[in-house]
Image (cartoon, rainbow, N blue to C red):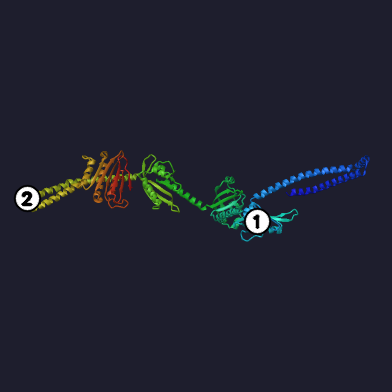
Amino acid sequence: MHKQLKHITARLGRRSVLLFVLFSSMLLLAVTIAQISRAGIHTANTESIRAYFLAIASGNVLLIGTAMFLITCVFYLLLMENRRQRRIIGKLRMQEEHLRVIISNIGEGLIATDRKGGIIYMNPAAEKLTGWSRGEAKNLPLEKVYQVVNEETGKPFENIVSRIFKHGLTVQPENNTLLHTKNKNTLVISNSGSPLMDRKGNISGAVVLFNNITEQKKRDDELKQSEEKYRMLIEQASDGVLIYSFDGTIYEFNEAAYKQIGYSKEEFATLKLPDLFFNEPVILNQAVADKIFAGQTVLFNRRVKKKDGTAMEVEINARMLPDGRSLAFVRDITERKRTEQAMQMALERYDILSKATSDTIWDWDIIHNRMHYNEGISKMFGHQITETGNIADWWKENIHPDDIKNVTDALEKAFKKERQNLQLEYRFRCDNGTYKYIYDRAFVIFDEQENPVRIIGAMQDITYQKEEELRIARAIADAQEQERRHIGEELHDNVNQILVGSLLTLGMAKDKNTDREKVNSLIDASKNHVLNAIEELRKLSHEIAPATFEKKSLRDIFETLLEGINPNKQFNINFEFDEAVNTINDDIQLNLYRILQGQVKDILNYSGANALEVKLTCSENSVKMRIFDNGRGFDTRKPRRGIGLNNIKNRAESFGGKFILNSAPGMGCEIVVEIPVEAEPGLQLVFK
């Protein structure tokens, strides 16, 4: 715009010259015409006039032609000048409009003042930021509208326009400024100012530019706080932190970086990367370096040299920064390495021990839910594995269904720290589908929060011992039966006959004695005693003597036993019997009879019941007997002095059966015995 103004000024000078030439030419033309006119007035006749005009014209034709030419040229030049001036004025107006639009739409506030500091213009951004409209602020002092103070001290600044006028220089941007608006708000602003010059180079006013940086300041403060927190975290980190380049330069480091290798901060600042290694290059493994250059995060181990010359094993986590330098986190793993070496030796000993024993050693990593076995898993059970996951499914598949609850209950108690050493007996499936009896000893390892993290155990095959125990138990039961048979026979054949003889003798004495009344009384009393003795001996004989199934079925014997305990109908007895039970092995029938006999005796002596249920059912693989009474019941968790239930359990286990006991105070008592008809003997004991 300044250039266009200069052009306008120059053209004004040219126009003045042209107007002067035009005026002179017209004056010359007028003078010439006037002379001709005067000459014509003083000449009378026509001939004289024509002669005079020819004389005048011949002398002034050059002047007239020159004047007319100059007038034409001046008019043409003036016309062209006017056209140029209109174009320049149009451009000036367009530039003025552009400038107005730009000033009105810039995001920064703009205030222009005169030489005295009065406001002559404010753009819309300045109105919005200060809260003053242009009309309100017109001619007001700048400090009235533009109230700024120092952000740190809260004290007012020297007027920015005053500083411009005083020094005649531009005021550079200042960011530590607070602006108090008309609406009592406070903004953090960045402001600057410049002098306005007239055409003579004199200061005619000033312009102030300012911008709201409140949000930017807030973000900068948050970033600064974040950087401070980051720096604090880095400084407090237990791992060393380094920023370095592969030429060996160390740019930044934290406290742990120099302390863990024995240097002071000042000493470490003078070191290069090669100073930390034992005569080794910075890049020891090119593949690792290539990954770092490719922007990958790489974890690797390396040995570094401490100040005292000793070695330290470190784990380095390194990656490339955007500026081309590398960031590394360095962790001292010397103790971890020693621990790993010690663990490796322990594992070697463990492996040797596991090979020397016939036990199956197992190691359960609870955190990762992995179970590791030694070679015993294949030698003992035939499973061709050494490690498995999904422990719940593995156990469900291989621990006998009747034993899984005992195992899981024991583990739950161990996890609750009720016990740390476990000793379990259960059956474990072999690869061929058969089961072996296992004696398992395990130890539970807990972490610092007392959570179980690992269990190590040893599985010992006790199948032979268990089978021997069952054979011995059965042999004992057979011996007891033989002994009872012998005692029963003796009582029945000898004692009973002697008492009968005594009865006959007393009867004969009755006939021969003279004191008939007294003797008869004594003899009758003796007779009654002997009869009672005979009855008791008969009952004892039947109780002790083994049951015989040669002439009676098991149903008949059970009915006889139940009728014998209910002579006065004090029990409401419900008896159900599956006739298929009569076809099973005699030893099993005898065992069932003894179990019923023992439980009935306990019911009579202790239960106080008035109802009794006995039910026998037979399936393809087993026979089941249920005995229930509605007596007073008892707490199965408390120990009992009697041996009746223990004898029943022993009888069930001697035939590989199950014994289930259900009872509670006031709820009666139920026992269920299930004995396999053809299966090998085994054991399952469950309390509910």
The answer to whether any part of residue 483 appears in the image is: no
Does dot 2 land on a helix, a strand or a loop?
helix
Left or right: where 512 falls relative to 671: left
Q: Is residue 86 visible?
A: yes
Q: Quadrant of residue 149?
A: bottom right
Task: Give the image location of residue 488, x and y in percent.
Answer: 20, 46
Mark-to-mark CA distance, 1 and 2? 160 Å
Residue 254 percent location from the top left of the image: 57, 55
Which residue type carries mark 2?
Lys
Q: Residues within 10 Å of mark 1 (few under 14, many from 20)?
A: many
- Give the answer, above or below, for where 386 lies relative to 333: above
Answer with mark 1 or mark 2, whichever residue precedes in sequence. Answer: 1
Q: Nearer the viewer, residue 576 or 476?
A: 576
Callout 1 secondary element: helix
Write down the residue under mark 2.
Answer: 512
Query: In this figure, which residue is indicated by the disc labeled 1?
Result: 137
In x, y percent, where is residue 553? Answer: 23, 40
Residues 111 and 313: in front is 111
Nearest the eye: 436 or 649:
649
In-image side of 411 versus 618 (left or right): right
Q: Picture coordinates of residue 8 (x, y %)?
A: 76, 48
Count of numbered circles in the view: 2
Residue extending furthest toward the front: 44
Q: Is residue 423 left or right of residue 104?
A: left
When asked about the image quadrant of residue 592, the answer is top left
> Is the residue marked by circle 2 packed among few (<14), some (14-19), or many (20+) residues within 10 Å?
few
Residue at position x 52%, y 52% from top?
A: 334
Above or below, 121 relative to 39: below
- Which mark is drawn over residue 297? none
